[in-house]
Image (tube, rainbow, N blue to C red):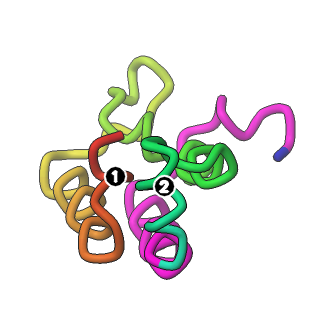
């Protein structure tokens, strides 16, 4: 992760693609997350780096300005693999 990864706006389509790419990893680590009662730190960092937590931030505030369909798409992409990331 570069120093500016968390500071850049990732386009909503790229966020969704990254989340879909992470879904198999989340599914494979579901038991680990459930046992720890939290997401593994590296998986949480991958979601952060993908732009998940800034998706709804308006462009005027430096975010990608993801609309409701984009946000819903990201939220729907992980639960089939593993529910805890969707809670985050």
| Nearer to us in this view, 49 or 68 | 49
Q: Residue at image x 14%, y 57%? A: 69
On screen, residue 81 above or below 32? below
Answer few, some or many: residues within 10 Å of disc 2's Cα (few below 14, many 20 plus, some between 14 and 19): many
| Nearer to us in this view, 87 or 13 | 87
Residue 17 part of the magenta segment: yes
| Nearer to us in this view, 70 or 81 | 81
Measured as percent of width and height from the top left, residue 32 is found at 54, 61
Question: What is the number of the mark on residue 28?
Answer: none
Measured as percent of width and height from the top left, residue 80 is found at 25, 76
Residue furthest front as drawn = 35
**Label 2, on which residue?**
33
Q: Residue at image x 28%, y 43%? A: 87
**Label 1, on which residue?**
84
Q: Residue at image x 44%, y 34%? A: 54
Residue furthest right as drawn = 2
For the residues marked 2 and 1, what is the alpha-carbon distance in whole angstroms? Answer: 7 Å
Q: Does residue 76 appear left or right of residue 86 in this picture?
A: left
Specify the segment rendered in magenta: 2-27
| Main SS of residues in magenta | helix
Quadrant of the drawing holding the C terminus:
top left
Which of the two discs, 2 and 1, labels the residue nearer the N terminus?
2
* Badge 2 vs badge 1, beta-carbon distance below 8 Å: yes
Answer few, some or many: residues within 10 Å of disc 1's Cα (few below 14, many 20 plus, some between 14 and 19): some
């Amino acid at each position: 992760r570069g120093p500016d990864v968390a500071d850049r706006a990732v386009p909503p389509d790229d966020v969704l693609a990254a989340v879909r790419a992470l879904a198999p990893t989340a599914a494979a680590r579901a038991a680990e997350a459930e046992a720890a009662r939290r997401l593994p730190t590296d998986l949480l960092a991958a979601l952060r780096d993908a732009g998940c937590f800034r998706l709804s931030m308006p462009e005027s505030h430096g975010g990608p300005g993801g609309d409701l369909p984009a946000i819903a798409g990201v939220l729907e992409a992980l639960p089939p693999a593993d529910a805890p990331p969707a809670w985050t």
